[in-house]
Amino acid sequence: MPYLALRHMRRRALQTGLTVAGVAVGVMVLIVALSLTNGFIDELVKSTLRATPMLTLQSFIAGDTLTDDPAVLAALETSNGVTAAAPFISSQALIARRASSSLGITARQGYTQVVGIDPAKETAVLDLEVLAAQAEAITQRGGIVLGASLAQQLGVMTGDEVIMRDITGATATLTVAGTFRVGNELIDAVASYMSIENLQAYLGLPGRISGYHVRLDEPTKARATGLTLADRFGLRPVSWESLFASLISQLELQKAVIGVVVFLIVLVAAFGIANVLVLTVSEKTEEIAILRALGASERQVVSVFMLEGFLLGAVGTVVGALLGVAVAAYFRFQPFPLPGDLYFITQLPVEVQAIDILWVCCVSLATSVLAGVFPARRAARLDPVEVLR
């Protein structure tokens, strides 16, 4: 039976080659598309976690503050799954650039979520290099670090002065100590940092904090670890996953849509396999009848065409998987440049996952085998008496 299947494939070499190429292209495109999507999601999550704590513990009452207790911080730092912790205080405020008629500078304003931190402790929680580099400037009275998009919106650079005013009307003149960019506009366009002592003084809340920023061993366990710590310390946990739940859902939906759309290419290739097999059955009607007359069973005839469909799909799948991994590897070691003014990254990220390759290959093989079911059943149902008559 394998001999007959191979002979049929060799007989229609051109169609066989085109069919295999169709399956290979579909598998290759699907693997590359999923790898690019994985890379983009991974890069976005990494950049987000640079400026977003994996876990935040705060009061159950919105806007309420806590006593800055070193004993609680020490106990939190030694908890299971916790790598580092730091106290913080946060507030919302309007921030603006001062106008100057003599210099022709117009006023610009924006909104900021300002966070007061201890740079020495916060740098162990976040991976923002600017906090460590500008720690001295931040701790001095009037130093503030702005997200790059926020700074661009205000039209300010390092060393410029900005004015901040909160809902109570409290006003302060601050000096931009530096800027940071993590690639997530939800952070870059809103967040700003200053020392915890300066923000406490500005808000009139000395010795008070909003809660604790926590870095974990496993970012994916933020929700479970947060519930454990919440029971222990009586604080409300807020994981990074809950903060960006809609964004993560959109990215996962995007990956699913890409997978479905590109899968249609594999489906089209499967129709090519079915077409080849139908033509083969039509051409080999007499041969099939002779085989049946010589004693070949329906099952044996079906197995010939099912095997042919499997071989076409298997060769195309293997070739496509190898090409897909090769293209993904090329983009990984020779990244495709992206315009930095349009995207938060300057290179096209790629992340190949074995599970994606596995399910793509399984779907491709299953589709190829199913494509051979109808032609195989048609061949098996031929009546040798009628054909030979």
Image (cartoon, rainbow, N blue to C red):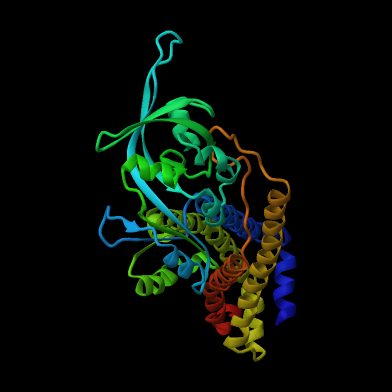
* Among the 4 quarters of the image, the one containing residue 96: top left
* Among the 4 quarters of the image, the one containing residue 318: bottom right
137 relative to 322, above or below: above
**Left-right relation of 302 to 97:** right
**Residue 246: % across, % down:** 37, 54
**Left-right relation of 317 to 127:** right
**Residue 30: % across, % down:** 58, 57
Q: Is residue 186 visible?
A: no
* Among the 4 quarters of the image, the one containing residue 336: top right
> What residue is drawn where x is 67% and y is 54%?
328
> What residue is drawn where x is 56% and y is 66%?
274
159 relative to 363, above or below: above
Relative to the observer, which residue lies in front, 160 or 37? 160
116 relative to 371, above or below: above
> What residue is drawn where x is 52% and y is 59%?
263
> What residue is drawn where x is 60% and y is 89%?
297
From the image, which quarter does the N terminus lie in? bottom right
Relative to the observer, which residue lies in front, 321 or 277? 321
Relative to the observer, which residue lies in front, 15 or 328? 328
**Residue 41: % across, % down:** 52, 54
Q: Can residue 378 be seen in this view?
A: yes
**Residue 92: % across, % down:** 33, 42
Report the label total. Answer: 0
From the image, which quarter does the C terminus lie in? bottom right
31 relative to 363, above or below: above
Residue sticking out furthest to the top: 102
